[in-house]
Image: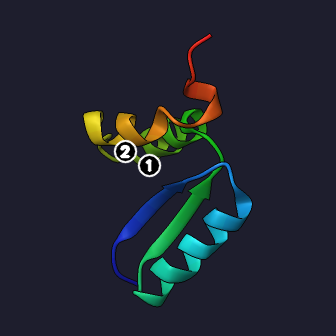
Amino acid sequence: MGSKVLLVDNNLNTQRMVELTLTAEFMEVVSVDDGLQALSKARRAGAPVLGAAALGLAILLPTFQAG
């Protein structure tokens, strides 16, 4: 396998489609449903968290929406 990718999407259909695309490109995919799970998974793996890039994507996930 090539690079390891953490995929975060709360839509199961979208998640599966992206997983298939990335695995076809020889990437190892770990999928989670929300931003909090993603941060937890990344921390346990000792992976660096990509600050603004990750936050920019995660802000659209329900567990990160304000109010």
* Residue 4 position by quadrant: bottom left
Answer with left or right where residue 25 lies relative to residue 16. Answer: left
Residue, x 44% and y 44% (percent of image)?
42
Identity of the residue drawn at 37% across and 34% down? 55
User: Measured from the top left, where is residue 39 in percent x and y?
Assistant: 48, 36
Q: Amino acid under label 1?
A: Ala
Q: Is residue 48 left or right of residue 40?
A: left
Quarter in which the N terminus is drawn: bottom left
Real-space Cα distance between discs 2 and 1?
A: 4 Å
Reading the image, the residue beneath label 1 is: 45
Looking at the image, residue 15 lies above or below residue 33: below
Which residue shows up at 52% across the image and 43% down it?
38
Q: What secondary structure is marked by label 1? A: helix
User: Contact (CB < 8 A) between labels 2 and 1?
Assistant: yes
- For the residue pair 6 and 53, the one nearer the viewer reads as 53
User: Residue farthest to the right?
Assistant: 12
Vertical position of residue 31 compared to residue 53: above or below: below
Tell me the tag on residue 37: none
Foreground of the two, 39 or 52: 52
Badge 1 crowding class, 10 Å Cα cut-off, few under 14, some 14 to 19, many 20 or more, is few
Residue designated by label 2: 46
Residue type (three-letter) at the residue carrying disc 2 = Gly
Where is residue 3? Give x, y as percent.
34, 73
